[in-house]
Each structure stands twice: as structure tokens, then as C-alpha cells.
Amino acid sequence: MLHLVRSDEADSAVPAHQRAVDAIQAAIRAEGAAARPPLFKPAPPRPAPSGDPLHHRIAEELEAIGRRLDLLGGTLASDPILVQRHAAQLQSIDLIRQMLGHLAQVVATDEKEKAVALITLAELKARLQRRPLTRPAAA
């Protein structure tokens, strides 16, 4: 049977070198996270959800279309001959799926600009942040 002994016990069953290693580990843990900067920057805050139920329903529909595209892409990608002949077009299905997901997130929030800023597809983000091509009609 295995008997575990804590190294901070003054028992002679724990070798001196183990007590030294445990002391070093305790000192490192005592430094805390303040001594070392985090490896990754924190994720930006998520935009607040929209209060309009229609926005959420539209976002859900966009996500449903995306799931259907995933299924279609998976089915087509299971045919090796089709993949060999149409690899770029299959990649387009995945890109369209990603775009739909980002657009769903934009639609589902009241903080549209914040949601657009979180988009990871550079081309889509640039198109959504550009100035309008035409002036909106005056009311």
C-alpha cells in the first residue's frame, strides 16, 4: 500500500532534497500571477444581446443555414474524387459558414459596432466597417 507523506512534516521519512524541492515550489507559487505577465491577453467583452426578439430569430435562422452548409460540406467532402476536383469550392462552403456565424452575432446584438470589431474574417470586417456607397434617403 502506498503511504503519502507531506514533505512539510518534520518527519525523517521525507528526504532533505524533497523538502528543498517543495520549498522552491512553494516560493514559486507564493510569487503569484503578479510577478509574471499572462501569456495571452484577455478576451474582449461580448456585446450586449439585442432586446428585439426578431433579431434573435434572424440570428437563429442564419445559424441554421450555417449548420445545413456544414452538413452539405461534410457530405461533399466524403467523396475523394469530388474533393480532388473541387477543393477550392468546398473551402468556399466553409468560408460562407463562418461569415453566416459572424453575421448572426452582429444581428443578435444592440452593440453592432462592437460585434463587428470582434469579427475575425478581415475581409468581412472591412466590408462592414466601410463607408456606405450611397447616401441614405432623407426621411
Image (tube, rainbow, N blue to C red):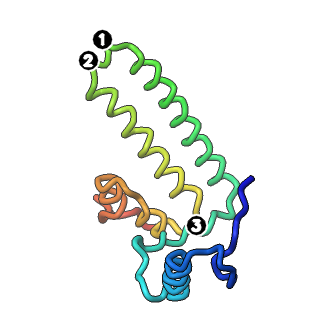
Q: Earlier in the sequence, mark 3 or mark 2?
A: 2
Q: Amino acid at mark 2?
A: Gln
Depth check, front residue: 73 or 4: 4
Residue 14 figure quarter: bottom right
- Return the x and y of residue 128 as percentages of the image width and height: 36, 59
- Label 2, label 1: how far apart the Cα atoms are: 5 Å
What residue is rendered at 39% in x and 36% in y? 94
Quick check: can you spot residue 45? yes
Q: Secondary structure at mark 1?
A: helix
Q: Amino acid at mark 1?
A: Ile
Q: Secondary structure at mark 3?
A: loop
What residue is rendered at 48% in x and 30% in y? 69
Depth check, front residue: 103 or 45: 45
Residue under label 3, please give it: 110
What residue is rendered at 40% in x and 38% in y? 96
Quick check: can you spot residue 139? no
Q: Which mark is residue 84?
A: 2
Residue 8 figure quarter: bottom right
Residue under label 1, please give it: 81
